[in-house]
Amino acid sequence: MRKSSYISKNVIRRLPRYLRKLDELIAEGVERISSGELGNQMGLTPSQIRQDFSCFGEFGQQGYGYNVAALREQIAGILGMNRNFSVILIGAGRIGQSLIGNFNFEHYGFRLLGAFEIRKELVGTKIAHVTIADAETQRDFIRENDVDIAILSINRDHAQAVADELIDCGIKAIWNFTDAEIDPGDSGVIVENIHFSDSLLALSYYLSGEV
Amino acid sequence: MRKSSYISKNVIRRLPRYLRKLDELIAEGVERISSGELGNQMGLTPSQIRQDFSCFGEFGQQGYGYNVAALREQIAGILGMNRNFSVILIGAGRIGQSLIGNFNFEHYGFRLLGAFEIRKELVGTKIAHVTIADAETQRDFIRENDVDIAILSINRDHAQAVADELIDCGIKAIWNFTDAEIDPGDSGVIVENIHFSDSLLALSYYLSGEV
């Protein structure tokens, strides 16, 4: 799937939402859907939907709507879900454990290879099918397994130092659950943030306008 | 703080990031900062920053830069951090426990009043200073305490049903940690989502373009 042309950040951010909706429709046995009905179910206009999908080429057929399964596969491909990216987790506290136990990495096309923790009392414990390993072994593990993505779910005070170490080991992307800003320098490493506070404050902003 | 004029979603989403940066600067003892230096530290252009802040009126003084503490207070006000919103948590599994134990609600101006859980074995246990209460008591609690915000960190299969119940009890906003889409119907209730998969798939998209 080529994506040499410029695609806006807002479209990229909507694609996973389309994917979730399409997964729901597949589970419900829906085979075809019009842009009108899809928009209706997602709170978007049909023209918005057609415009979003047109960035990546034609998905639908005028008058016949979209083939749900085919559209799902195309979006999955665009999102790199067929790339089989490898993931490790750095920091197996509550958030880390929650991701190991509850997040369906395989469904999204990722392989969770391991989890690492600095607190010795957690090393060796098992969450789902993952045994927590000693953080001292993570550098070698990344190099030996050519790991693509590191989930950073450690204390914010150590976030940048650990990120620097991961980058030095050849990690290609960091999924950052600390509320620190990670600076990848000129490494080209991709940093994607889950900043809980940003989300709650956006909610707070909208709520302030209401009450 | 008036915000009758239209403010783009992208600006709203950037405000918490400015807040985090300003908190950092305050911790470092920085009192004034130019839009150039702030932009430099945040990877934004000075004109972007001036434009963002201009939506809310004038924060800075030409040639003198911004007063960091005053700017922080103004942004905090815009984000409703002075509204003292009350919050409860529905679902005290790993994610819920992590939020209770690690998220600094008070720092952002929120009061976490309680946490509720359906699994009897968790009821009565204590996370930080919060004792987990029985989910059967949450309806009365919301009504009696006029709760503003519910954090939804339960199983996705029950997400909509529980959300409907919360809305029925008069909750004004839902911070949704399930990967289900919550439909607030015509209630006017605000739904803000933390969809982990959306974030990981955006990362995956950008990484696919790199490797």
Image: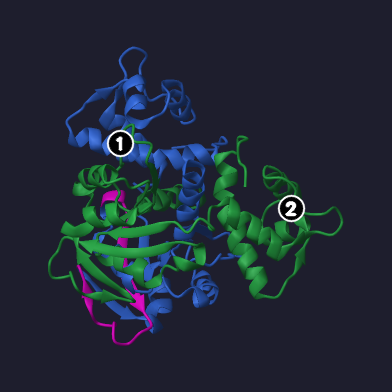
Chain colours: A blue, B green
Instruction: Return the chain for callout 2.
Output: B
Q: Which residue is mark 2?
A: B59
Closest to the observer, A182 or B8: B8
Closest to the observer, B66 or A110: B66
Residue lying furthest top: A63
Part of the protein shown in magenta: A107-128
Residue A131 on image: x %, y %: 24, 75
Q: Residues within 10 Å of mark 1 (few under 14, many from 20)?
A: some
Assess whether mark 2 and mark 1 are in contact (beta carbons under 8 angstroms): no
- Compared with B64, A207 (above or below) is above
Same chain for the residues under marks 1 and 2 in the image = no
Q: Is residue B48 magenta?
A: no
Q: Indicate the secondary structure of the residue bearing disc 1.
A: helix
Instruction: Return the chain for callout 1.
Output: A
Q: Which residue is mark 1?
A: A21
Residue B199 on image: x %, y %: 42, 51
Residue A69 on image: x %, y %: 26, 32
Closest to the observer, B64 or A53: B64
Residue A8 seen in this snapshot: yes
